[in-house]
Amino acid sequence: MRAVYSCDPTATRGRIVAEEESAHRSPFQRDRDRIIHSSAFRRLKHKTQVFVEHEGDYFRTRLTHSLEVAQVARTMARSLGLDEDLTETVALAHDLGHPPFGHTGEDALQALMAPFGGYDHNAQALRIVTHLERHYAEFDGLNLTWETLEGIAKHNGPVPAPLPWALAASCTGIDLELSTHASAEAQVAALADDIAYNHHDLHDGLRAELFSTDELAELPILDACFAEVDRRYPGLNYYRRRHEALRRFFGVLVEDVLDHARAVLAEVAPQSPMDIRMAGRPIIRFSQSLFEDLQVIRKFLFTRMYRAPSVVVMRRDVTQVVEELFPFFLQNPGELPKQWRKDVEDVSGDATALARIVSDYISGMTDRFALQSHQRLIGGVEGGTVKGPHSLNFGA
């Protein structure tokens, strides 16, 4: 049953370019399908989540991460009476703006773009769906609904001024009310992201042997999960034991968000989607006690996984790749693919505009294409290798 505070697809605020809607799909379903069929979504298959994508078939990529986020987001949306299609759409789109090499690549681009307005992957995701996807005859981007654009822009909360340039440019002609919170659907997508990466980073870290099962069993939340598995299945195989414990951990996070959200909703008593946006605080979030326990786990991951000694080497190597590709394309824009050269011609003499085109191009690269491009245009990374399981992420 749809809650009164859920977003109603029949009452959408519409699209930037008016279109005749589908007879068989709601506006939010159509948004979801456009994202799935976008070039940027397909490229997530070969973009880092935690490990460089070619390092192993079992590690998560940015694509499989997005699919896991969408799965748990739909589950929570259904439980709370929200629009599942809008929730899934925001979940699938939330990482479209990530550059190659995960947050390491983003750090490098942010530093390189500092003189030209900076770089932010959330803002870049909105730029992709409003500008950079160029397949349709009548508009650039995907021409998504207002509610989907809002969710992409502020699923993590209100966006304070000054806005990232990519976000400000993408919002030209459309007011996404960035000073308010997002819909409950977008908030669910944001928490689903937290749940997914906290769960699968532990799983991938174990597979990479960056820490042991015994170490995980000493962490808060996880200690109770392992104890429950040991009680129910004494002597269980090592791999099954850790899988059973981690799936219970996953369930604890989901149940905590749902229980806490129901309590907050009962207190706030929203009667419309706008009441959610104007509540002055996030409605969908972890309880304080579980959030504090998660901070211990995140600190463990930061130390043992995201800043392991091998990671420091890998961060240096892939940072060098981005740092050398960026000035190369600034100095040699003719090396950009043909479809980018018209943009370069249009901004002739504007250094900032050219830098933003180069940033758009590099941020769209997959891990393997960035490495191949660097090897072809510049040469290998001196003194470094890009192989072996090395974590490049340090956060969602």
Image (tube, helix red, strand yellow):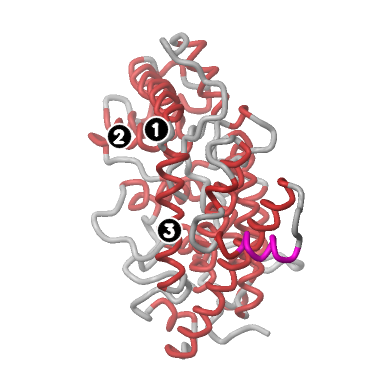
Residue 98 is tagged as none
Q: Are marks 2 and 1 in contact (CB under 8 Å)?
A: yes
Along the polypeptide, which appears first: circle 2 or circle 1? 2
SS for callout 3: helix
Q: In the image, 73: left or right of 240? A: left
Q: Main secondary structure of the magenta part?
A: helix
Mark 2 crowd level (few <14, some 14–19, many ≥20, 10 Å Cα): some
SS for callout 2: helix
Question: Where on the picture, by quarter, is residue 173?
Answer: bottom left
In this view of the protein, which residue sits in the foreground, 161 or 58? 58
Along the polypeptide, which appears first: circle 2 or circle 3? 2
Say which amino acid is labelled 1.
Ser
SS for callout 1: helix
Q: Which residue is mark 1?
A: 359
Identify which residue is drawn at 43% across, 66% down. Answer: 291
Query: Image height check: is 188 above or below 201?
Result: below
Q: Which residue is mark 2?
A: 113
Using the numbered discs, state the Cα–Cα distance from disc 3 to disc 1 in whole angstroms.
19 Å
From this viewpoint, is residue 94 visible?
yes
Identify which residue is drawn at 37% across, 45% down. Answer: 120
Using the numbered discs, state the Cα–Cα distance from disc 2 to disc 1 in whole angstroms.
8 Å
Identify which residue is drawn at 59% across, 73% down. Answer: 255
Q: Is residue 227 magenta?
A: yes
Q: Is residue 199 magenta?
A: no
Residue 265, given in percent of the width and then of the height, sits at 48, 85
Q: Quadrant of the N terminus?
A: bottom right
Query: Image height check: is 186 above or below 360?
Result: below
Q: Which residue is mark 3?
A: 153
Q: Which residues are magenta?
A: 225-232
Mark 1 crowd level (few <14, some 14–19, many ≥20, 10 Å Cα): many
Residue 157, given in percent of the width and then of the height, sits at 38, 65
Say which amino acid is labelled 2.
Met
